[in-house]
Amino acid sequence: MIKLIASDMDGTLLKDNKEMDDEIDSVLEELKKKQIHFVAASGRQRNSLEKLFEKHLKDVTIVAENGAYVVHNGKELYASCMSEELIALVLEQLYQLENIGILLCGKKYSYTNSVALYENLRSPKFHYNIVLVENFSDVKEDIIKISLSDTSAKGASDYSFPLLEKALTGKVEIAVSGFDCVDIVNKGVSKGTAIEALQKMWNITPEETMAFGDNYNDVQMLQKAKYSFAMKRADDGVKQYANYIAGDNNENAVIEEIKKSIIEVKK
């Protein structure tokens, strides 16, 4: 019996236009009746995720910033803040790269010196609380994640990620996420560790867990669920970690799988 469902957002539960189908409302209501926990697990900021689920905040657990920030029923359960030394080390490596935008992510706000990144993330597509800064040294909030947006010709997988992985291996968790982005958090932090902590808190096993994802930052989360689904358009490298393949995110594949596996069962 499924007791926990965790889903990535961009490229998974969200369509390419960054919207969810209205049917998510009735699905979440059914899961609540069945006492099944729903977890929105994303590289996105807490505010962005809460905006998406503003009608269901008491019923949706937020795993934001790739597992670095976990919120349940409006209360912080966990936050993994990066040390000043680690932030300086990561920024030193990022400054050596070309054609990237840098984002420092705190609990309340994200900070960037890129106008393009600022305008994109503050748009209705993302609803970020974001601040445009001249120098990252001006940021006073604790930082829980550092991201970069790679606009190079090669993209994140072939340019920024391998260079950063080589320079920072063993010091941080680093993964490619959507839109040619690379996310960097403290060592030992991931969507997978966040889901594992929730499983322990709620006394739920991987055999009672369903998870959906489409990118490499979802891999550890997929490994925590027996019913793990990679999306149809996910890379083969992601699909190898999933036990099942879901359909297209633009065709509401996550909602359809939940309905088929849980809501429509034994009606």
Image (cartoon, grey):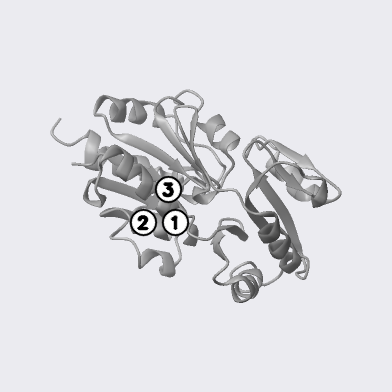
User: Mark 2 — residue?
Assistant: 222
Judging depth in this view, the residue of 141 and 128 nearest the camera is: 141
Between disc 3 and disc 2, the foreground one is 3
Question: Compared to 93, does 229 lie above or below?
Answer: above
Judging depth in this view, the residue of 252 and 184 nearest the camera is: 184
Q: Is residue 265 left or right of residue 126?
A: left
- Mark 3–mark 2 Cα distance, whole angstroms, equals 12 Å
Tag 2's secondary structure? helix
Tag 3's secondary structure? helix
- Are the residues flagged by discs 1 and 3 in contact, CB closer than 8 Å? no
* Residue positioned most to the right: 134
Image location of residue 259, percent across then percent down:
27, 37
User: Mark 1 — residue?
Assistant: 218
Residue occupying the point 72% across, 68% down: 93
Residue occupying the point 45% across, 51% down: 191
- Are the residues flagged by discs 2 and 1 in contact, CB closer than 8 Å? yes
Going from N to C along the chain, the mark reached first, 3 or 2, is 3
Q: Can residue 86 be seen?
A: yes
User: Mark 3 — residue?
Assistant: 194
* Amino acid carrying mark 1 in the image: Asp
Q: Is residue 164 left or right of residue 3?
A: right
Question: Compared to 21, does 197 lie above or below?
Answer: below
- Mark 2–mark 1 Cα distance, whole angstroms, equals 6 Å
* Amino acid carrying mark 3 in the image: Ala
* Amino acid carrying mark 2 in the image: Leu
Q: Quadrant of residue 133?
A: top right
Q: Is residue 68 left or right of residue 2?
A: right
Residue occupying the point 35% across, 64% down: 241
